[in-house]
Image (tube, rainbow, N blue to C red):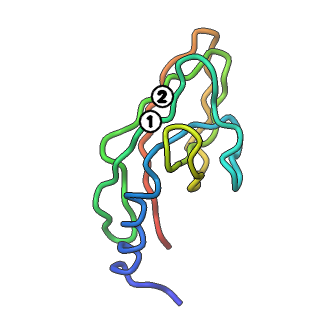
């Protein structure tokens, strides 16, 4: 049974309190948030969500992460807290990125869609 955009938007509103931090991963995080980047100055980033429209919603602005040198990133995710917390889900980046020994930053734009 397909839901209307209004119902999907209402479902997405729940993310405001559930998915408050974004993460970056070195492999598919699966159902548990596995393979999160670690080391260097990496940390999850706090996110806030715009109002949903048409069954999708995007974070306000972007989230910028410090990626340690020698790391390849492939996925992003969402959590309920800065550390520990509850895994809320994630997905593949549009393209993997490989960081040299110097490391660098990665800027994430995140959209959630209810279908």
Left or right of 22, for residue 51: left
Which numbered disc flags the more N-terminal residue, 2 or 1?
A: 1
Picture quadrant of residue 38: top right
Q: Which residue is drawn at 57% across and 15% down?
A: 103
State whether residue 96 is above or below residue 31.
above
Q: Name the residue under label 2.
A: 65
62 or 45, nearer to the observer: 45
Q: Residue at x 70, y 43 (%)?
A: 34
Left or right of 17, for residue 67: right
Q: Distance between the residues labelled 2 and 1?
A: 7 Å
Image location of residue 10, percent across then percent down: 36, 74
Q: Which residue is drawn at 56% across and 23% down?
A: 67
42 or 92, nearer to the observer: 42
Q: What element carries label 1?
A: strand
Left or right of 58, for residue 101: right
2 vs 1, front mark: 1
Contact between marks 2 and 1 (CB within 8 A): the answer is yes
Instruction: Categorize mark 2 by other alpha carbons within 10 Å: few (<14), some (14-19), many (20+).
Output: many
Q: What element carries label 2?
A: strand
Which mark is on residue 109?
A: none
Q: Name the residue under label 1.
A: 45
């Amino acid at each position: 049974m397909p839901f209307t955009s209004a119902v999907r938007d209402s479902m997405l509103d729940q993310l405001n309190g559930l998915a408050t931090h974004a993460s970056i991963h070195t492999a598919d995080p699966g159902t548990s948030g596995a393979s999160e980047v670690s080391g260097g100055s990496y940390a999850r980033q706090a996110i806030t969500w715009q109002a949903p429209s048409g069954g999708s919603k995007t974070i306000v602005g972007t989230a910028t992460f410090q990626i340690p040198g020698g790391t390849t990133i492939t996925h992003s995710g969402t959590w309920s807290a800065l550390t520990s917390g509850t895994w809320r889900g994630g997905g593949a980046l549009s393209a993997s990125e490989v960081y040299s020994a110097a490391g660098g930053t990665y800027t994430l734009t995140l959209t959630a869609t209810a279908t």
